[in-house]
Amino acid sequence: MRDDIKIRVENLTMGYGEVILQQDISFSVRKGEVTVIMGPSGCGKSTLFRHMLGLQEPISGKVYYDDTCFTDSELPTRQSILRRCGVLYQSGALWSSMTVGENVALPLSEFTDNPDNEIARIVDEKLTMVGLKGLEKKYPAELSGGMRKRAGLARAIALNPEILFFDEPSAGLDPVTSYKLDQTILELKKHLGTTIIMVTHELPSIFTVADQSVYLDPDERRMTAMGNPHDLIRNPPNESVKAFLTRNNTEMISK
Ligand code: ADP
């Protein structure tokens, strides 16, 4: 695989039981870029996300990480690939009975031999990066929705992942909070060089963070557009992606 390609999805067909949701999806995720998986609700974005993380198996097709075929790999190889990935699920998925600090420390105590003081230092560093410095003693229920997402983000970056996966990070957030979260995501990309895959249907996020995007068409059940969203809105390859990208006030969102 080319050096600048981190993940390659090749001819992926996915579905549930007899129902084919999307077929023959192929795209590459470039190193150090944000790739957005976009499309209307129900088109299969989260399902694709789960396939890329091995949480669901394809009907056919493959997912490669660097030169390794993830889809064909046995569990130990999959686990070592997944250890290079951080994941932020929609809900933030924090343990409610643990403090924010304990949540962020969890992957560190599980996967490293770091002593407690080093873990505490890393927890402080990650919470600072996401704008939650000093809040390690709080419980998730004491935080706002946006802060919970940030805490989930701190946990996702605890092990310095090469690759970060976000499933609808702005879901349930007001526009200002969502904008701030997008800016934090861009800072992580800039400062850590992280490769990012994000599922979203939110136009402001798409136009702010995406270097690359793939569009899943719910009617055709295949990927019908790929590229930088600003290029796609200028030269839409089909009506479906055009309608999707222009469904709000485009002056606000197109730079
Ligand atoms: P998106 O993330 O684009 O909103 P999803 O990937 O969540 O879409 O879901 C795509 C479609 O697959 C939806 O129509 C949904 O009803 C269906 N679906 C999702 N999960 C399951 C499941 N576990 N079993 C059967 N159908 C499912």
Image: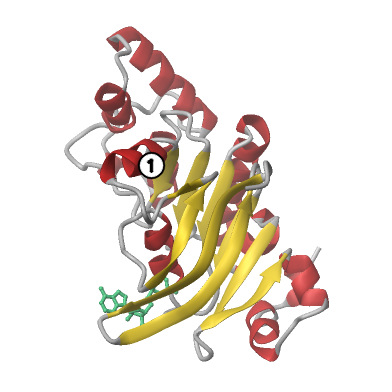
Which residue occupies 49% across, 44% down?
A: 164
Q: How many marks?
A: 1
Q: Position of residue 25 (x, y in %)?
A: 53, 72
Q: Position of residue 255 (x, y in %)?
A: 81, 63
Query: Going by the image, does 92 lie left or right of 153?
Result: left
Query: Going by the image, does 50 lie left or right of 233?
Result: left
* Relative to 171, residue 14 above or below: below
| Badge 1 density bin: few <14, some 14–19, many ≥20, Cα 10 Å | some
Instruction: Depth check: give the residue in front, 64 or 92.
Output: 64
Tag 1 residue: 82
Query: Of the residues shown, which amino acid type is indicated by label 1?
Result: Leu
Which residue occupies 25% across, 26% down?
A: 110
Q: Position of residue 89 (x, y in %)?
A: 37, 53
Which residue occupies 51% across, 76% down?
A: 24
Instruction: Depth check: give the residue in front, 111 or 198.
Output: 111
Which quadrant of the frame does ligand 1 lie within?
Answer: bottom left
Instruction: Depth check: give the residue in front, 172 or 5.
Output: 5
Query: Going by the image, does 207 lie left or right of 166?
Result: right
Which residue occupies 83% across, 76% down?
A: 234
Q: Is residue 168 visible?
A: no
Q: Position of residue 73 (x, y in %)?
A: 35, 49
